[in-house]
Amino acid sequence: MLEKSELPMAIRGVYLALHRKTDAKFADYGVTADQFVLLATLSRGHALTQRELARRMPSDPSTVRAMLVLLEKQGLVEREVHPSDSRARTVAMTAAGKKKFKQLWRASETIRTQMFQAIEPDEANVLLRLLKQLTDSLNNDTRTPSMARNA
Amino acid sequence: MLEKSELPMAIRGVYLALHRKTDAKFADYGVTADQFVLLATLSRGHALTQRELARRMPSDPSTVRAMLVLLEKQGLVEREVHPSDSRARTVAMTAAGKKKFKQLWRASETIRTQMFQAIEPDEANVLLRLLKQLTDSLNNDTRTPSMARNA
DNA sequence: ATCAAATCGTGCGTATACACACGTTCTGCG
DNA sequence: CGCAGAACGTGTGTATACGCACGATTTGAT
């Protein structure tokens, strides 16, 4: 018998545990878990606008802005005005940012390893699929959950 | 092929989606998603100390304190000095708190329903198990992941 | 071409998450 | 009994999450 609030609570539980552990791991490097997420997102698509960056993280635009201000102070990212849209600003990692990201990736390797050791390889794929299904379901306000496929 | 950072990102993704949706749902009631978690925890074990409450949420003791101050202002919870330990304070829901919690539970029913419609019943159990395994793995600092069983 | 509507970034306010330091009280060992 | 160390709550500081409102710019429809 499955208590109806167990699943939401379990989701909250893993996320917080993961976040805490990652923050602790990165403390020596002067960055946070969420800043790592931002850098990782940048590393997969350069010259994003702040809006697009926020959409991909996913995070709120005003949150992303605050993070960018801090990361800019550390010299890890740069912002420039968009070439064709003077409202927008494009964001890119600096050389220092790329270097830092590599360090963080290596430092967090143990966490990912630990996670994948806790579950079977097959299960990891199932888990990933279920999490994405839940996310799509929660994000889609419409009552037609049909076309959410390749997100 | 599974990108190594996909699983952590997916966990982050569901949690944030769930949190946003819950916050939006509760906005009319003047409470937050996390305050609901606190009330739900209280409803399953009365007269907890702040520390024990924080341990069960799970959250940081100083975070819980801040939340309690706000909930106390709203008259949803009460704090009293512990009968045998004058350092500690016990927390309990007021009548208004219990009533509010029932309202919140009903209001959030649609979210839980939506989640369980997004996955198969069997899968829900698998998902829950995997999430707990991951949580245990992330919380255990020791290198012996043996005795984490019935958490 | 013009003007309303949408979009972008910014700034502000509130709530959460956590680390850390502090004073108080309790516990347990000698 | 007395005292060191642990445990509890408090307070502070920083980072994140998000809603909302604002000015500036771009877009789209006429």
Image (cartoon, coloured by chain):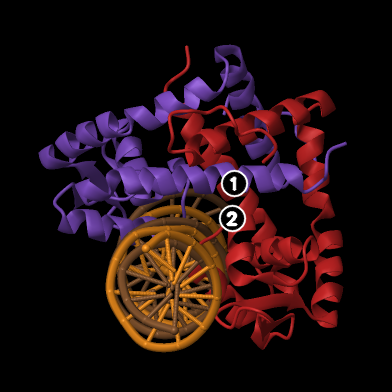
Chain colours: A red, B purple, C brown, D orange
The picture places residue B56, in percent across and down from the top left corner, at: 44, 40
The picture places residue A133, in percent across and down from the top left corner, at: 60, 31
Relative horizontal placement of residue D30, taking residue B141 as reference (left or right)? left
Of residues B15 and A88, which is closer to you in this image?
Answer: A88
Residue A58: which disc?
2
In the image, residue A113 above or below residue A79: above
Residue shown at 22%/48% (left/top)? B28
SS label for mark 2: loop
* Circle 1 chain: B
The residue wearing badge 1 is B13
Of residues A130 and A14, which is closer to you in this image?
Answer: A130
Of residues B104 and A68, which is closer to you in this image?
Answer: A68
Query: The disc labelled 1 sits on which kind of residue?
Result: Gly
* Circle 2 chain: A
Residue shown at 68%/36% (left/top)? B134
- Quarter of the C terminus of chain A within the rendering: top right
In the image, residue A78 above or below residue B128: below
The crowd level at tag 2 (other Cα within 10 Å; few <14, some 14-19, many 20+) is: some
Relative horizontal placement of residue B43, taking residue A1 as reference (left or right)? left
Asked where in the image residue B73 lies, by quadrant, the reply is: bottom left
Residue shown at 79%/60% (left/top)? A44
The picture places residue A124, in percent across and down from the top left corner, at: 76, 31
Residue shown at 36%/48% (left/top)? B23
Marks 2,1: beta carbons within 8 A: yes
In the image, residue A137 above or below residue B5: above
Are both tags, 2 and 1, on one chain?
no
The crowd level at tag 1 (other Cα within 10 Å; few <14, some 14-19, many 20+) is: many
